[in-house]
Image (spheres, rainbow, N blue to C red):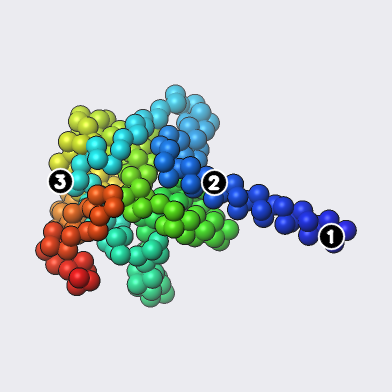
């Protein structure tokens, strides 16, 4: 019986690792048209008796405003181009802050958010967090930073039923992802902590305040590099990217 159980576990592990690695390799090149969260949201709409609403247009990174990667780095993950999936400095700061009580501070990187959105389900369990770390390590190993950013900007929720840069550009600003202005990109980035609560189409005074702060922080982010290139520290007006060179 022990041999049978061990053999079953071994084959299960082999199947898991082979299938997940294959999925990550395939999605290095194939557009991500659907994510688990999109299906979950559709199920919630049907359960609430609402009509299905999902706006999602995949576009390549070169067809997205160059301001948007800079804006989401300034808002969500300022060390994105420096770390390998996990920002341990941010994790330590968040842990110290959370021990003091009050509003919980997160330290999830863009890489972690991409892994979660593409491969996993929403939630806060330790099991899901473990899978998130696993997939984060895989995409950091097998994808470029440009591919991670491309998938992130195409897959994340940016409003109620709106996923990705091109959809939010069309439905909230009446334009395309390529033509989003610097201010519009900062406003979109400002919604990302909770895009179903905060609107880039009808921004509140609080959202305008966040937008302005993100635009200030964008000065300290370098221009997002093209595939195969490193960032140019001279495109940042200061901050950690100038210190690293």
Element class at badge 1: helix
Query: Compared to 157, does 74 lie above or below?
Result: below
Quadrant position of the C terminus in the picture: bottom left
Asked whether disc 1 touches disc 3, contact meaning CB atoms under 8 Å apart, the reply is: no
The earlier-in-sequence mark between 1 and 3 is: 1
Q: Would you say 215 lies left or right of 119 here?
A: left
Labelled disc at residue 22: 2
Q: Would you say 207 lies left or right of 132 here?
A: left
C-alpha separation, residue under disc 1 versus residue under disc 3: 61 Å
Query: Compared to 231, does 185 lie above or below?
Result: above
Q: At x 30% / y 65%, what residue is drawn?
A: 82
C-alpha separation, residue under disc 3 versus residue under disc 2: 37 Å
The earlier-in-sequence mark between 1 and 2 is: 1
Image coordinates of residue 40 in percent, x first then y, are 50, 38
C-alpha separation, residue under disc 1 versus residue under disc 2: 28 Å
Image coordinates of residue 181 in percent, x first then y, are 15, 41
Image-quadrant location for residue 180: top left
The earlier-in-sequence mark between 3 and 2 is: 2
Labelled disc at residue 3: 1
Q: At x 72% / y 52%, what residue is drawn?
A: 11
């Amino acid at each position: 019986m022990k041999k049978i159980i061990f053999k079953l576990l071994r084959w299960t592990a082999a199947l898991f690792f082979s299938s997940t690695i294959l999925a990550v390799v395939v999605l290095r090149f194939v557009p991500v048209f659907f994510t688990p969260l999109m299906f979950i949201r559709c199920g919630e709409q049907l359960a609430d008796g609402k009509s299905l609403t999902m706006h999602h247009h995949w576009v390549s990174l070169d067809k997205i405003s160059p301001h948007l990667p800079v804006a989401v780095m300034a808002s969500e993950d300022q060390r994105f181009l420096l770390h390998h999936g996990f920002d341990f400095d941010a994790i330590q700061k968040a842990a110290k802050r959370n021990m003091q009580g009050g509003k919980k501070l997160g330290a999830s990187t863009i890489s972690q958010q991409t892994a979660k959105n593409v491969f996993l389900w929403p939630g806060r369990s330790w099991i899901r967090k473990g899978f998130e770390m696993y997939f984060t390590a895989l995409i950091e190993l097998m994808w470029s930073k440009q591919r991670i950013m491309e998938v992130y900007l195409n897959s994340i929720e940016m409003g109620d039923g709106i996923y990705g840069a091109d959809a939010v550009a069309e439905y909230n600003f009446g334009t395309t992802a390529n033509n989003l202005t610097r201010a519009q990109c900062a406003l979109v980035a400002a919604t990302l902590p909770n895009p179903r609560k905060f609107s880039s189409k009808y921004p509140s005074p609080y959202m305008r305040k966040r937008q302005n702060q993100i635009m200030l922080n964008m000065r300290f982010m370098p221009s997002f590099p093209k595939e195969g290139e490193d960032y140019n520290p001279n495109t940042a007006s200061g901050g950690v990217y100038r210190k690293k060179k």
